[in-house]
């Protein structure tokens, strides 16, 4: 009798430990989405919370596709009225107005073209295509419309990586130059470094009436007032070298991606200053360009092989969207999981011990 009890307890303890270990393994496995879309080379990534899928743009096909968490691809928008071979850059989901905003840019040597397109999220119908005005027309410089963020009134803010300014496109599609702050050109740029032409890049809207913008060629971040476009440098403990995309989690943590890193930042004073509290190495070869906050507030980067696309390569079929976790944040979670499993085990052993005593006592009585 007592031998069976011991054996049973051992089996149960074993099962408990195993369950704990399995849940730890599951918890430590980030979500990887691999999807097939020949020649897509997507640059932009957004998450549509209502449809529960990701949205990616195309490098040359004038299409925008949805990618499910299992990697099923569906063409959402195909817009052959756009000029040939233009790139779909930044994407933003306007949940209030149920619209998808897409930055459309023509890369060298195509004729210059910079616009913001708005599509109905449900039907895919185009609502407007707003050309983004250039104040450098005379100089003939190619402007580079890059990323877009949207506020709660449906105003879109689009970065210009060449001109280092920000356009605004209101909910009716009227566009203007919104912020041309001197802060954007106050920092020296090494003209010999790669991507030195690329200034203002990723942009995100913070619900408190300002935007955060990152600048690739300086690694700086700026806080831009939503009302008047004034901008201030965000003081950081390190430069975000070659910063590209930016996204904000619902808990306020800011994520910034570069071709080889994902930075996790937080701020205690609404982005007067901020701190990088973790940075994760990414796969440079797969050239991540965008980060989005997906289901359950998780960070996802887009591995779009864009560099390969820019070099004129064709034929790649598989691309990826991958969850990236802060090991520091996760470490804390794992510790708690261990503590919980440990507590459950201790409680179980205590209960088992009491039961055994009860059984022994009853044995004594019956004897
Ligand atoms: C677009 O790309 C195709 C295929 O590379 C090429 O044949 C065509 O000339 C390009 N169109 C323009 C306007 O450059």
Image (cartoon, rainbow, N blue to C red):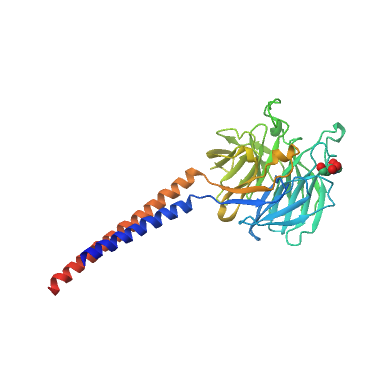
Extreme residue toward the bottom, this view: 366
Q: Tell how many labels.
A: 0
Q: Nearer the viewer, residue 306 or 243?
A: 306
Question: In front here: 254 or 268?
Answer: 254
Q: Is residue 148 above or below residue 367?
A: above
Residue 309 vs residue 54, the one in the foreground: 309
Residue, far right? 138
Q: Residue furthest left?
A: 367
Q: Residue at the spot x=43%, y=49% of the render?
A: 334
Q: Position of residue 327 (x, y in %)?
A: 49, 43
Residue at 75% over, 49% down:
102
Q: Could you say which quadrant of the image residue 259 lies in?
A: top right
Left or right: 263 as drawn, with respect to 46: left
On the question of residue 289 being in view, the answer is: yes
**Residue 256 placed where, x, y %?**
61, 41
Question: Is residue 160 visible in the rendered structure shown here?
Answer: no
Ligand 1 shows up in the quarter that is top right
Q: Position of residue 11 (x, y in %)?
A: 32, 60
Q: Is residue 123 left or right of residue 214?
A: right
| Residue under the image location 17 percent in, 67 percent down | 360
Q: Nearer the viewer, residue 146 or 316?
A: 316
Q: Quadrant of the N terminus?
A: bottom left
Residue 275 in the image: state x and y as whole percent: 54, 38
Quadrant assignment for the C terminus:
bottom left
């Amino acid at each position: 009798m007592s031998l069976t009890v011991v054996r049973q307890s051992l089996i149960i303890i074993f099962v408990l430990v195993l369950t704990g270990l399995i849940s730890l393994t599951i918890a430590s496995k980030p979500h990887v989405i691999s999807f097939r879309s020949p020649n897509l080379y997507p640059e932009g990534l957004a998450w549509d919370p209502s449809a529960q899928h990701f949205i990616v743009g195309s490098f040359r096909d004038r299409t925008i596709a949805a990618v499910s968490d299992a990697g099923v691809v569906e063409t959402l928008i195909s817009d052959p009225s756009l000029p040939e071979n233009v790139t779909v850059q930044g994407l933003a989901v306007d949940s209030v107005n149920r619209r998808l905003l897409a930055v459309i840019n023509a890369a060298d040597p195509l004729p210059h073209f910079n616009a913001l397109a708005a599509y109905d999220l449900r039907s895919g119908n185009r609502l407007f295509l707003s050309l983004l005005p250039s104040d450098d027309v005379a100089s003939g410089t190619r402007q580079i419309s890059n990323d877009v963020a949207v506020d709660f009134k449906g105003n879109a803010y689009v970065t210009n990586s060449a001109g280092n300014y920000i356009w605004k496109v209101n909910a009716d599609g009227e566009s203007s130059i919104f912020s041309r702050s001197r802060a954007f050109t106050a920092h020296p740029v090494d003209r010999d470094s790669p991507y030195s032409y690329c200034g203002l890049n990723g942009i995100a809207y913070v619900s408190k009436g300002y935007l955060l913008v990152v600048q690739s060629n300086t690694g700086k971040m700026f806080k831009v007032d939503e009302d008047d476009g004034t901008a201030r440098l965000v003081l950081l403990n390190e430069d975000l070298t070659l910063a590209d995309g930016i996204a904000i989690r619902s808990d306020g943590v800011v994520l910034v991606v570069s071709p080889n890193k994902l930075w996790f930042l937080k701020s205690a004073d609404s982005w007067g200053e901020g701190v990088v509290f973790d940075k994760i190495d990414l796969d440079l070869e797969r050239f991540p360009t965008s980060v989005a906050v997906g289901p359950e507030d998780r960070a996802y980067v887009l591995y779009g092989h864009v560099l390969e696309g820019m070099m004129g390569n064709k034929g790649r079929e598989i691309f990826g969207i991958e969850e990236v976790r802060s090991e520091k944040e996760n470490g804390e979670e794992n510790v708690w999981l261990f503590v919980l499993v440990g507590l459950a085990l201790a409680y179980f052993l205590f209960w088992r011990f009491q039961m055994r005593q009860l059984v022994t006592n009853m044995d004594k009585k019956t004897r």
